[in-house]
Image: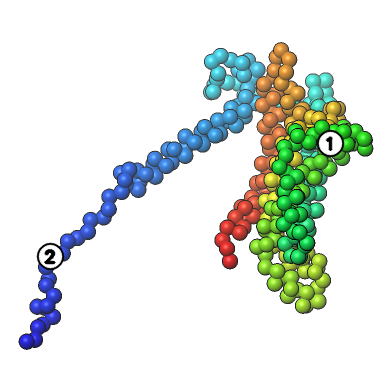
Amino acid sequence: MAVSVDEAVSPGPTRQRRPATRRFGGGRGRSVVEVALLAVLAVVMLFPVLWMIETSIKENRDVYAVPAQFFGFTVTMDHFRDVFIAPGGGRSDLSVAFLNSVLVAGVSTTLATVLGVPAAWAYSRFAVKAKKDQLFFILSTRFMPPVVVVIPIFLMYRQVGLIDTKLGLILIYAAFNLPFTIWMMKGFVDEVPAEYEDAAMLDGYTRLQAFRRFTLPLLVPGIAATAVFALIFSWNEFVFAIFLTSSDEVRTAPPAIAGLIGGTTVDWGLVAAASVVFALPVLIFAYLVRKHLVAGVTLGAVRR
């Protein structure tokens, strides 16, 4: 007996599936909640920064006003002037400290980068004997905080005459940044295929020329990211700066700003203005290398 297709397939009533209802009142309500939570978190995180900036542009009477004035205060730039100009004229001690920080942090970061990048490339490309042990020893130098080793370093510096010198700070900052630079850059070098250098050497380049002309340009994002973190350490370092320096001509900004707090009265407007000026160079440097910084931080996130 033949059965037609229409008879075999029953055209019964079909149920339409309802779209699944989303929680929190749908996607729009969830987005509103997320934005609100992020806004609250941003306010909590940025409030100290905003308060510091606001204090730096207040007059002293508004700084010490009770209750605190968030709005309606008189704006002044006298505190920023006092950061750079001494009361009697000329350069202030804070301005000298800022210049010392720029010199010490910049040179130490450059030195650590110049030494760390080739070392990381060598550990990544060559079969070094006991490579893992050497890398672990390099990393172990960062296990201890600076306050633990500052006394032995102070005694060694006193013997060689590096106490209260900029060269002493540059060397110790570069030494502390070098292990971090080697470890961080080794990960970036591992992501660059070694076949690029092999192909270049087949074309007649030496190994160093192949590294300089082909591998090094690909490491620019990683170098920028590493340099930013090394600069932040050198710029914010406090323990070595306060133990290994004593004169205003050599002291960097962190101990100089800390020296403003003490005694019976504290000029909080000057402290806030000095803190704002102190934070600007690192922010400017990070902004200038922001493209390389983002690329360097995310390099290696996706495996080949």
Mark 2 neighbour class, 10 Å CA radius: few under 14, some 14 to 19, many 20 or more: few
* Picture residue at 56% right of the left edge, 61% below the top: 302
**Which labelled disc corresponds to residue 153?**
1
The residue positioned farthest toward the left in the image shown: 1
Between residues 92 and 213, which one lies in front from this camera angle? 213
304 relative to 166 in the view: left or right: left
Q: Quadrant of the C terminus?
A: bottom right
Q: Position of residue 35 (x, y in %)?
A: 43, 41
- Amino acid type at image mark 1: Ile
One can see residue 270 in this view: yes
Q: Position of residue 144 (x, y in %)?
A: 72, 39
Mark 1 neighbour class, 10 Å CA radius: few under 14, some 14 to 19, many 20 or more: some
* Picture residue at 13% right of the left edge, 75% below the top: 9
* Picture residue at 84% right of the left edge, 43% below the top: 171
One can see residue 96 in this view: no
* Picture residue at 81% right of the left edge, 36% below the top: 100
Quick one: SS at disc 2? loop
- Amino acid type at image mark 2: Pro
Q: Are marks 1 and 2 in contact (CB under 8 Å)?
A: no
Q: Nearer the viewer, mark 1 or mark 2?
A: 1
**Which labelled disc corresponds to residue 13?**
2
Q: Position of residue 82 (x, y in %)?
A: 75, 24
* Vertical relation: 289 (above or below) 147: below
**Which labelled disc corresponds to residue 141?**
none
